[in-house]
Structure formats: C-alpha cells, structure tokens
Image (tube, rainbow, N blue to C red):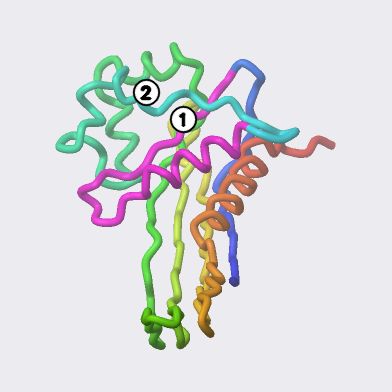
C-alpha cells in the first residue's frame, strides 16, 4: 500500500477540556458519502491515545438540529455550513453541547482495477484452486474542519491510500488483502488529532 496524508490549515486551532467535536459524513446528495464504518472508525480512533478528543455523538447532533441535517435540507458541501449556522436556534444548540469543531468527512473506497483469474474444482480425489487474481483499491477521504467559536473554516485534512490485494492459489488460496480503508481511517484520525489539538506558539 501507499498512503498520503496531508493538511491545509487556514487558522490556528486548539481545544479545551470541556469542549468536544462532532464528526459526520457528507450528504448523500453529493454522490460519494463517506461510509458509515469509516465514520465509526475515525470517531473511535480520535477518542483513543494520549491526545484523545471528546466526540459528541453524531446521531444526537443530527436529532438536535432537526430538520436541518435531514437529507433534503442538509448542506450539500462543507462550504454551506455557515448558512446552516445562521438558521434560527442552530448556533445556540451547537454551543449548548460544547461543540467546538464540526468535522465534515467526504469520500469513499473504490476499486480502480483488477485482473488475473482463479478457478477451483473438486473431484473424487479431492479439490483445489489454481491461478492468481488481483485488484486495486483507492480509499480517498477529505475532512473539512469548522471552528464553531467564530464560525469559520479552520482547514482540511485528507487521506489517500492505494493498495493492491492478491490471491495466489496453488491448491489452497492464500489471500493477501490490502486494507486501504483501515489505513485511511488511521491516517485521517491521527492527522485530525494533531490538527485540532495544536495550539499556536507563544513568544
């Protein structure tokens, strides 16, 4: 596998102990919503380790902002979030829950190519598989971070992982799977924690 994790920071960041973040996927209307298991994975990993963050439950956040995060009314892009915050009562509901940052994740995992062949057969004397099959996946995700303290975009973190899985078989198949989504989740979560907890230097 090859992985690339990058960030683009628009403003200094930092978070207090009583503040939290909320992580949710882009609207399904955008065509490539982040998978639920990716969101769950990132949420779990940013809550672990020495620099763990408090994460507000996504479901409770959507319920609190009903109906503004329903599929037909949700922002279509991360850049539409300021319009959402201007709706009556939204800003107050966000602050009541101590949410400092909204993390909006967009992306997917897709198969980019495949090839080879694998055949299996069984007979009176036993069975087996022969051949070699392979496929390549790309997991590409972008996380846009909005600072609720001033309602501006703090920046963006992206993770792109390419990997090729192979199944060679000489009687018994031996799958060698490239878990690109898991690698993208790990890289995205680590970079998010660094991005958010980083405080500006003082002189």
Kindly state the secondary structure of the residue where label 1 is placed. strand
Q: Residues within 10 Å of mark 1 (few under 14, many from 20)?
A: many
Tell me, yes or no, whether the highlighted magenta stretch contains residue 185.
no
Residue drawn at the location 54% of the way across and 56% of the way down: 184
User: In the image, 64: left or right of 70?
Assistant: right
x%, y% of residue 67?
A: 20, 24
Residue 118 horizontal side relative to residue 4, left or right: left
Q: CA distance from mark 2 to mark 1?
A: 8 Å
**Residue linked to disc 2:** 61
Q: Looking at the picture, how far across and down is residue 180, in whole percent?
A: 52, 62
The answer to whether residue 160 is above or below residue 166 is: above
Name of the residue lying farthest toward the front: 124
State the residue lying farthest toward the right: 203
Quadrant in which residue 127 is drawn: bottom left
- Quarter of the rendering containing residue 199: top right
Q: Which residues are magenta?
A: 19-47
Q: Residues within 10 Å of mark 2 (few under 14, many from 20)?
A: some
The label on residue 22 is 1
Give the percent coordinates (x, y) of residue 14: 65, 32
Q: Position of residue 45 (x, y in %)?
A: 60, 39
Identify the residue at horizontal 37%, vertical 82% (top origin): 123
Asked whether the beta carbons under mark 2 and mark 1 sit within 8 Å of each other, the answer is yes
Using the image, tell me which numbered label, if any, was put on residue 173.
none
Say if residue 166 shows up in the picture.
Answer: no
- In the figure, is residue 7 to the left or right of 28? right
Q: Nearer the viewer, residue 83 or 64?
A: 64
Residue 174 visible in image: yes
């Amino acid at each position: 596998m090859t992985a690339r994790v990058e960030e683009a920071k628009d403003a200094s960041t930092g978070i207090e102990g009583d503040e939290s973040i909320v992580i949710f996927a882009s609207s399904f209307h955008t065509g490539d919503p982040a998978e639920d298991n990716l969101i769950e994975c990132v949420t779990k990993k940013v809550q672990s380790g020495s620099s763990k963050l408090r994460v507000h439950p996504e479901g409770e956040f959507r319920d609190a902002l009903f109906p503004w995060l329903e599929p037909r009314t949700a922002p279509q892009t991360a850049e539409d979030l300021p319009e959402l915050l201007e709706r009556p009562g939204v800003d107050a509901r966000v602050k009541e829950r101590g949410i400092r940052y909204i993390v909006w994740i967009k992306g997917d995992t897709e198969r980019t190519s495949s090839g080879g062949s694998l055949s299996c057969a069984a007979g009176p004397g036993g069975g087996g598989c022969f051949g070699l099959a392979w496929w390549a996946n790309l997991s590409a995700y972008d996380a846009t971070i909005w600072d609720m303290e001033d309602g501006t975009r703090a920046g963006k973190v992206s993770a792109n992982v390419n990997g090729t899985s192979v199944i060679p078989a000489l009687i018994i198949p031996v799958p060698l799977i490239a878990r690109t989504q898991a690698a993208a989740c790990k890289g995205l979560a680590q970079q998010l924690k660094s991005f958010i907890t980083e405080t500006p230097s003082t002189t």
